[in-house]
Image (tube, grey):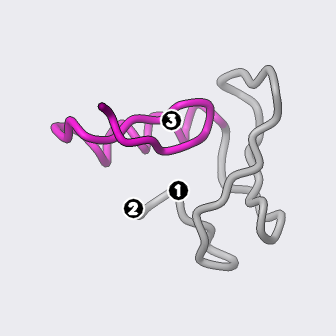
Amino acid sequence: MNDKLDCKACGTIQMDIPDNTTENTPILCSNCGAFLGTWGELQDDFAKQIKGASVLDLDKGTIVKKS
């Protein structure tokens, strides 16, 4: 993955996603606390990156393999 999903500060893809998020909820890196973007931006970025892929999905902040 690239672009918004990876933390520019520490290089991981670990998101701290609070309960009851909205499109405007700020999402932080759970490893170092850096701001990654809003929940809406991150979902849009993920969808753009996997466009055409039928094996991945985003479920409550976790990238999952579709069955």
Kind of residue at disc 3: Gln
Which residue does the numbered mark 3 point to in the structure image?
43
Q: Which region of the structure is painted magenta?
A: 39-67
Q: Which mark is residue 20?
A: none
Q: Position of residue 4 (x, y in %)?
A: 51, 56
16 magenta-colored: no
Q: Residue furthest left?
A: 52
Label 3 residue SS? helix
Q: Is residue 5 left or right of residue 45?
A: right
Q: Position of residue 8 (x, y in %)?
A: 61, 73
Quadrant of the rendered structure where residue 55 is? top left
- Dot 2 or dot 3: first in sequence order is 2
Residue for point 50% across, 35% down: 43
Which residue does the numbered mark 1 point to in the structure image?
5
Between residue 38 and residue 10, name the one nearer to us. 10
Kind of residue at disc 2: Met
Residue for point 73% across, 45% down: 27
Mark 1 vs mark 2, CA separation in Å: 7 Å
Quadrant of the rendering where the N terminus is positioned = bottom left
Kind of residue at disc 1: Leu
Between residue 51 and residue 24, name the one nearer to us. 51
User: Badge 2: few (under 14), some or many (20 or more) residues near its Cα, within 10 Å?
Assistant: few
Mark 2 vs mark 3, CA separation in Å: 13 Å
Compared to residue 9, the image places residue 26 above or below, namely: above
The image shows a total of numbered marks equal to 3
Whether label 1 touches label 2, CB < 8 Å: yes
Compared to residue 52, the image places residue 5 above or below, namely: below
Mark 1 vs mark 3, CA separation in Å: 9 Å
Q: Position of residue 31 (x, y in %)?
A: 77, 68
Residue for point 61% across, 39% down: 61
Which residue does the numbered mark 2 point to in the structure image?
1
- Dot 1 or dot 3: first in sequence order is 1
